[in-house]
Amino acid sequence: MKKYRRIFTIVVDSLGVGALPDAADYGDAGTDTLGHISQRMDKFVIPNLTKLGLANLHPLKQVEAVKEPMGYYTYLYEASTGKDTMTGHWEMMGLYITKPFQTFTETGFPKELIDELSQRTGRTIIGNKSASGTEILEELAEEEIATGHMIVYTSADSVLQICGNEETFGLEELYRCCEIAREITMKDEWKVGRVIARPYVGKKKGEFKRTSNRHDYALKPYGRTALNVLKDAGLSVISVGKIFDIFDGEGLTESNKSKSSVHGMEQTIEIAKRDFEGLCYVNLVDFDALWGHRRDVEGYAKEIEKFDVKLGELLKLLQEDDLLIITADHGNDPTHTGTDHTREKVPFLAYSPSMEGCGKLKDAETFAVIGATIVDNFGLAMPERTIGSSMLGKLK
């Protein structure tokens, strides 16, 4: 018999809480996204996360632990190999990833990959570095328009992105080139999580704008996940933010794109006002994309404070048979070197208005306890060859 009718799982993208035991293998020894942000800030106002036990779990400079937190909390350790968004989310829903998705942040893509992409598309490639989408257009879009060359770039995530002017390059041609890139990057040594078509309009610097005709060519999960189980059972599986891209739509019944993390929380709040049975799965990406990768401590801290305000609004809407889970998918310590994600454990905060107990749970050896707990709640079984065990019985 199900315990909760609605489960809201919110992923605060990149909010790590301390280096994993193998962090040194990734160049991430001593990292602590949340802890180091707290240490660098004079003020850090997060009353709702505090009530849920965040400072009880992870000591913070400005925030004292509370005597009676509202729910349960613990650390989750990543079992899979890697520290990227797809690996973290796929593991949450039961998959054990042994081959990490490739990133090319520091070096750009290998010459062999670029040569093959150029030969097969018939285009000279420019760019081939890590950059923001707006920066790369300001730098190279005029050249692309004038010459017909093709802008290829990446980021700190496992992505290959191709820009194309809608008027001169053409959408169909852009999509054709991306389909070729997706095929090429299926090789293990070049396997990126997503190839993204980035169309834009404009004719000169200062006028370029990306359009809504973006298209993601994502990898499908390597097997069935908790999301498939829920959908097949006739339950709602509602996504907010990047979840659709991360799972390539697999196991979802509804998808909502977000303009920002604040917008994502606003969407979640509106969903909480609806009547449904199942899961609302949320990714809030600005923490990672805007602040972690850019090593902006203050920006990251303020984003957490904005989230906390919206969290307070969501908490007021939760019903007796609702469960809220707050977690993360990896770290991105803004005080660390470079611009990459960091290999960290993540928080697990769980709350329901019906809970009578609270406190620290035993650390979990995998993010997959989340998917297993959700599936168990609805009296279902996880797919074969998945990992993770349910924590439902501990949430009393």
Image: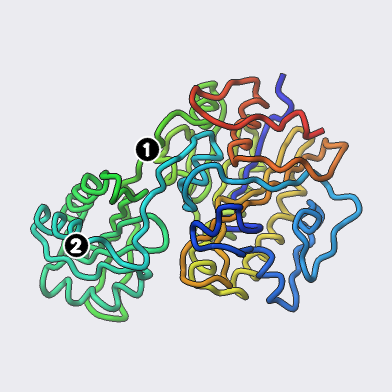
- The answer to whether residue 266 is seen in the rendering is no
Q: What residue is disc 2 on?
A: 111
> What residue is rendered at 60% in x and 32% in y?
388
Q: Secondary structure at mark 2?
A: helix
Image colouring: rainbow
Q: Nearer the viewer, residue 40 or 45?
A: 40
Q: Is residue 67 left or right of residue 290?
A: right
Q: What residue is disc 1 on?
A: 220
The location of residue 370, given as percent across then percent down, is: 62, 37
When the figure is inspected, residue 305 is found, relative to residue 143, above or below; the finding is: above
When the figure is inspected, residue 228 is found, relative to residue 284, above or below; the finding is: above
Q: Do tag 2 and tag 1 residues touch (Cβ < 8 Å)?
A: no
Q: Quadrant of residue 124?
A: bottom left
- The answer to whether residue 149 is seen in the rendering is yes
Point out the frontmost of discs 2 and 1. Answer: 2
**The residue positioned farthest toward the bottom in the image shown:** 205
